[in-house]
Amino acid sequence: MATLRISALTMKLPNGQPLCSDLSFEVSAGEVLALTGPSGSGKSTILAWLTGTLHPAIRTTGKAYLDDQELTHLPTERRRLGLMLQQDYLFPHMTVGQNLLFGLPAGSKSERWKQVCKSLEAAGLNGLENRDPITLSGGQRARVSLLRTLLSNPEALLLDEPFSRLDSDRRSKIREFTWCSAATLPILLVTHDSSDIPSGARTVSLLEQIA
Amino acid sequence: MLLREPTRLLGGAVLLLFVTPLLAGLFGTVLPAFGLLPGLAETEGFTQLFNDSRFWPSVKLTLQTGLIATALVFLLTTLCLVCVQRTRIWRWVLASLPPLLAVPHAALAVGLLFLIAPSGWIARLFSPWLTDWDRPPTAWVVPDAEGVSLIIGLVVKEFPFLLLAAIAQLPSLHVDASLAIGRTLGYSPARCWSRLILPQLYSRIRFTLLIILAFNLSVVDMALLLGPGNPPTFAVFLMTLVSDPDSRAAASAGALTLALGVFIVFAGLFLIERLMSFWSQQRRANGHRGAGLKLFRAFGQWVISSVLLFSVFALIMLILWSVAWRWRFPSALPQQWSTAQWLTKSNTLFDPLLLTLCIASATALLAMIAAVIWLELERLQRVPKLNSVWFVPLLVPQVTLLFGWQAIALLLGIDGHWLTVVYSHWVYALPYVILILAIAWREHDPNWHHAANTLGGGYFRVLSKVHMPMLVKPLSQAAAVAVAVSVAQYLPTLLLGAGRYQTLAIELVTSFGGVDRRVIAALALLQSLVPLLAFLAALIVPWLVLKPRAALWQR
């Protein structure tokens, strides 16, 4: 059970404008921490920094740890952080099953396929493995995208407004599905909508942080 | 009665003007090839063509140079995207693309010759301190018999073209997000590219790749400058046949064979695509994450930087040679500088310049008018989208179409007329102009028109005062591209101008080898400067037009 920790993070835009200053927090396994703030306050930028995909022009200091391992100097692919963005980004040249296989580690072909079918069944999506992602509804796509992330066995989950493009009915279902599916992981949720935050979750407001 | 809106009739006229030379080219090539054009070719030409001892060696050389150059262009583009995108070098790559695209093939070929020849700048740079050469070495020659120099020239010129086509597609492929998702799933950047982005990108740049392939297999001007003479490439061999009245039928038969050969190669490429697609689908989701391979990225960055530097230095060579007076081997820089050749050879330099400017301006103007008429009619839903028709001249070898046009022009007695030359340039400029303008035209919000109409603006007033000023940036870019295309046209000017129009392209290629290097460099430099200035104007004009309206300038 991992813990995600950020220590003394300071970020500045190329023009010198601060995005956050000396920000520190910790998210334990099974816990959800919500990063809130208005658009442009730097919420997504923090996730990009955590995953190592931040634009080099943004100046940063600070460190991130997964348990005791420092992440900051590791390449993105070795950080073991699962990422879900506002759009689901299901790869259009792969079927639903291939999208999920893409998330799974290498191994026996039949075993991996069984695992894909099993996870689809558990998510109530059985029979969709050979479908083109474009034929799925928004809610189905969101679930497949989360499954793909979880099948790669991440140690923590980063969510960048993953529910914002869904209608209110699907939104609450997908939220529940997400909290249940990733119940054992530390989850860092970026949102500007307070209804996305599960009850009992801690909140860090970037606006207050800068003020 | 005044025209209130463009009518279908106008669209029909544009299409007819465009399609007529294509059909004429087809008939004018097919008929003489089979000996069916009395007065020009009265016996079939295939027997003479196949019995010519130069036929097979030239076919072999063409396949060798054309296929290797195209494969290298594709590999370099891929390498550039995988290894250079999102690095510090990327903005230098982006900055170098417009000037490299603007420089005509022949001018770049001359610059490359000054760089890679035994007496070229690279040999001078390392002599005599490292090589002990105090005379140009004899270890290699340029042009070489294997066509290596030609391959280098084609790669250096065509790589920026394919790269630009690929870069234009990246935003719609959500490259940054796909890379972020792929890498957080544990995949190396190279694997993310090969499994997520390239399979989607390839289908979008396939058409540009086919244009490059057709060009590389049929190029004449660059092959005359950088290709071997014996055997020459197939297109150059056909040029020797067409200038001999007894071989006209064989030349036409060869032009048809070339077109057929290009389409067979296209079919081969589709087959390779299928195999690659099947193979990559098997591997795409096997879960192997791949290694980071920092060394591979560093190698890729080195290769791309070298190729681009090579092109830039080729252009610098043109500048140096055009102002050199004494420049003996092995000096890396001229021993004496002079602008004398610019003054004493002003007739050789500035008469072709003036003619080139006149033809290019007329071509650009006519291509812009035709493209705007067609796209407006398309917007008004009075004509269909005809993307595939506009690109026919780019996919069929120039030799094939132009031999036919020349034959028909000869029969009609219109060869050697300046309008015929402009017409031929127009046919090659229009596809690019339509391609550039179509994107902006189709994305333009029709509500601007509706809003202006409700304010009482008539059709032409809205078009000239609202629509076109809003699209001044793509309009300027399209005009600059039309100028660049026209300035580079060697074969249409030569064949349809009946040798009467000494444009910069014609003067450069025909005087190469027989005229002073310094004058050749000056000609090549002038030929490069015209499109470069056109692109500079394409940056300045929108700024001047839209200066008071900053929001539009940002678009």
Image (cartoon, coloured by chain):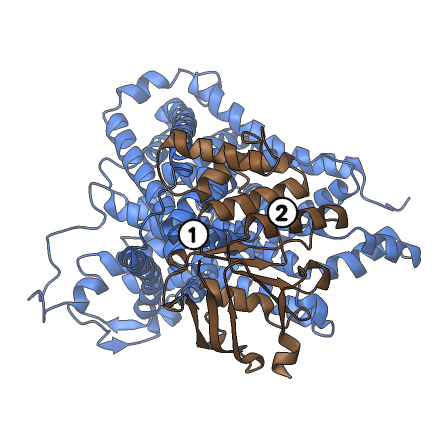
User: Among the chains, which one is brown?
Assistant: A
Tell me, for residue B505, which label it has, or none. Answer: 1
Residue B57 seen by the camera = yes
Q: Position of residue A37 (x, y in %)?
A: 66, 71
Mark 1 secondary-structure assignment:
helix
The amino acid type, in three-letter code, at marker 1 is Ala
Q: Could you say which is closer to the camera, residue B262 or residue A9? A: A9
Q: What residue sits 64% from the left and 34% below the top?
A: A135
In the rendered structure, the answer to whether residue B50 lies left or right of residue B395 reads left
Asked if residue B138 is positioned above or below residue A92 in the image, the reply reads below
Quarter of image, res B516: bottom left
Q: Which residue is mark 2?
A: A177
Measure the C-alpha gap from mark 2 to mark 1. 67 Å
Residue B427: x %, y % from top left? 57, 41
**Front disc: 2 or 1:** 2
Quadrant in which the N terminus of chain B is drawn: top right
Between B144 and B97, the one nearer to me in the picture: B97
Of B3 and B432, nearer the camera is B432
**Image coordinates for residue A137, horizontal then vertical, percent:** 68, 39
